[in-house]
Amino acid sequence: MILFKQNDNIEDDGSSEWLLTYSDMVSLILCFFVLLAAVSTIDMAKFEQISSNMAKKLSDRDIVRPIEMIVQDLNHDMTVLKIQNKASVYNDKKGVVLDISSNLLFNNGGASLKPEAESILKRFAATLNAERYEMFRYEVQGHTDEKGTKIPPFSSSWELSALRSSVLVNYLASRGIKASRFRAVGVADNQPKVPSYDPYGNELPVNKEINRRIVIRIETIRN
């Protein structure tokens, strides 16, 4: 009787070789982003866009893009409120920036919210507190000009800018946003958007009004 031994070394037909190529590609992509994060300051909006596009190419599905969504929502809020000439929202390398003229929220030289500011802040608070944006934190910055040093009861622009940012944080937190997601910062007149004086030392009132503002920086919470 002749016995036939089964051959355990079944020849591979090569049908699974693509898995090796795919895993190599994924590993290279991962290494690329790790290296990118290690050596550079990441533009979060561009990073989100690139990651979303890559995921769509690899898995053929749409990816949620919260940075893009919050910019669209805030722009919609400003349109509904009709304050596009006094507020703006844009992306930078750290995240999203909501820029609001101080005149919309405060009287000149004061730190108490105007009555008409409530409708504006209620709408912004509802957007910032949406569940889909729970991965964001908010740094509220007060920006003034040097005249803050001359308006009682404040002894300096630092006091005025810090109090304004604190007042705004308190209000937004009262609308249900967790206080732990906020940081209040007084910047005084140290980060103007435009020059307050021309080359001859003449005051530029329009520019000074632009520089008096509240900035809400919207950044991703990093655990």
Image (tube, rainbow, N blue to C red):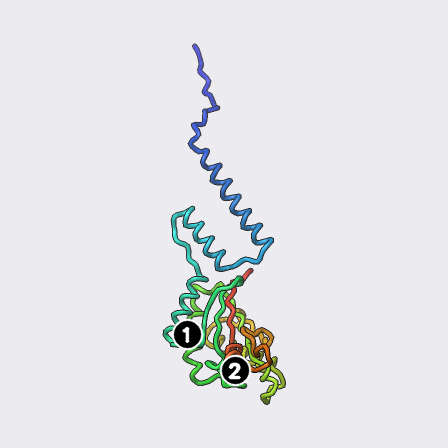
Label 2 vs label 1, nearer the camera: 2
Q: Is mark 1 on a helix, strand or loop?
A: loop
Which residue is identified by label 1? 84
Q: What is the spatial separation of the Cα atoms under label 2 and label 1, in whole angstroms? A: 20 Å
- Determine the secondary structure under disc 2: helix
214 horizontally vs 75: left or right: right
Dot 2, how many residues are within 10 Å of its Cα: few (below 14), some (14-19), or many (20+)? Answer: few
Q: Name the residue under label 2.
A: 205
Residue 14 location in percent, x, y? 44, 30
What quarter of the picture does the C terminus occupy?
bottom right
**Label 1 sits on what residue type?**
Gln
Image quarter for residue 184? bottom right
Q: How far across and down, in percent of the image, does residue 79 sit? A: 38, 73
Residues tagged 2 and 1 counted as in contact (Cβ below 8 A): no
Q: Is residue 188 among what the camera can see?
A: no
Q: Nearer the viewer, residue 102 or 60?
A: 102
